[in-house]
Image (tube, rainbow, N blue to C red):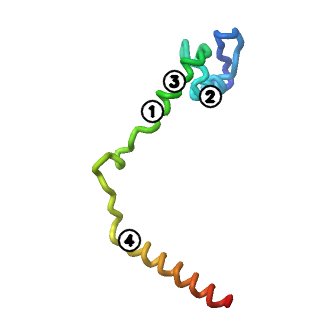
Amino acid sequence: MASNARILNLSNNRTVKRSQAIGRVEQCISVWVEVNMSIRDLSNAERIQARSIQAREALELEHAELPGITFKPPIGAQAAHVMEMRNAYEANRFYTEAIQ
C-alpha cells in the first residue's frame, strides 16, 4: 500500500495520510477501526489508559536484565578499562604539572 494513501478519520469525517494515521495511533491519539482503512480519535480517558499500557510495555525488562542475573564483563575488557583509566589519570597529572 502506498505511504500517501488516505485514511478516513471517523471522528471528524476527514482524511489523513497513512503515515499521519500511523503516527496518531503510535502516539495514542487515535485507534484503528479498520486497519489501514479508518481510525477514530480516543477520548481523554482512553488516551490515558492507552498511554499507561504503552508505558508499561516499554518498561518490561530485557532478557539480560532479569532480576538475579548479574553481568560480569570479560577479563580482557576489565584490563582495558583499567589501562584506559590509568592513562587518563596520567594525562591529567601531566597537564596539571605543565600549566604550573
**Mark 4 vs 2: CB contact within 8 A:** no
Identity, as a three-letter code, of the amino acid under mark 2: Gly
Quarter of the picture holding the C terminus: bottom right
Instruction: Choose the circle earlier in sequence order: 3 or 2.
Output: 2
**Can you name the residue that lies furthest to the front here?**
100
Nearer to the camera, 28 or 32: 28
Quarter placement of the N terminus: top right
Bin the neighbour count of mark 3 within 10 Å (Cα to Cα): few under 14, some 14-19, many 20 and up: many
Q: Are marks 4 and 3 in contact (CB under 8 Å)?
A: no
Q: Is residue 60 left or right of residue 12?
A: left
Is residue 80 shown above or below 99?
above
Q: Which residue is mark 4?
A: 78
Please tell me the numbered disc located at residue 42. Answer: none
Circle 1 sits in a helix, a strand or a loop, which is it?
helix
Instruction: State the image coordinates of residue 91 (x, y, percent, origin top left).
Output: 57, 83
Q: CA distance from mark 1 to mark 4?
A: 35 Å
**Of labels 1 and 2, the one closer to you:** 1
Q: Which residue is mark 1?
A: 56
Of pointers 1 and 3, the one earlier in the residue sequence: 3
Instruction: In this rendered view, identify the residue nearer to me: 16 or 58.
Output: 58
Q: Which residue is mark 3?
A: 50
Q: On the image, numbered disc 2 is attached to which residue?
A: 23
Q: Callout 3: helix, strand or loop?
A: helix
